[in-house]
Image: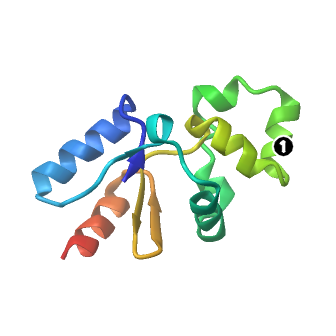
């Protein structure tokens, strides 16, 4: 599970995983960073409209030029510099990814754990 330790949704996900007895490893995107290679795998598998958190404070504070860069080739650079631009949490297992933490993601996490 990738996230940010003080993110409320990540905290809820961690509690839920523990309550469900699902093993996980937490990777703090802010503290531990993310490699360009790993991010490239994410971008190949996850639509950028799903990955970018357009409702978050970080995105809303960007000027129009910076928002335009997120639509172009500079997306990797932007996301590595500001991991809070990504929706969280992000779950990864065997090359499969889930973004967010709602009922459909919970159902998939249960399937992955079975």
Q: Residues within 10 Å of mark 1 (few under 14, many from 20)?
A: some
Q: Residue at x 56, y 35 (%)?
A: 84
The quadrant of the rendering that contains the N terminus is: bottom left
Tell how many labels: 1
Q: What residue is disc 1 on?
A: 69
For numbered disc 1, what is the local secondary structure?
Answer: helix
- Up the image or down, 72 lies above or below 78; here it is below
- Does 50 sit left or right of 65 as displayed? left
Among the 4 quarters of the image, the one containing residue 50: bottom right
Q: Position of residue 7 (x, y in %)?
A: 39, 32
Q: Quadrant of residue 31?
A: top left
How is the rendered protein coloured?
A: rainbow
Residue at coordinates 62% horizontally, 62% vertically from top-left? Answer: 37
- In this image, 106 relative to 83: left or right? left
Residue 92, position in %: x, y?
41, 64
Residue 11 quadrant: top left
Vertical placement of residue 3 versus 36, above or below: above
> What residue sits 67% from the left and 32% below the top?
59
Task: Tell me what residue is drawn at x 11 percent, y 50 percent.
Answer: 19
């Amino acid at each position: 599970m990738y996230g940010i330790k003080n993110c409320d949704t990540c905290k809820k996900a961690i509690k839920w995983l523990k309550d469900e007895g699902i093993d996980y490893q937490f990777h703090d995107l802010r503290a531990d960073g993310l490699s360009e290679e790993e991010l490239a795998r994410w971008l190949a598998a996850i639509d950028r409209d799903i990955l970018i958190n357009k409702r978050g404070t970080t995105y809303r504070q960007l000027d129009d030029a910076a928002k335009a860069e997120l639509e172009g080739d500079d997306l990797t650079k932007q996301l590595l510099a500001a991991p809070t631009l990504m929706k969280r949490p992000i779950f990864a297992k065997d090359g499969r990814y889930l973004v967010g933490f709602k009922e459909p993601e919970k159902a998939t996490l249960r399937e992955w754990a079975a």
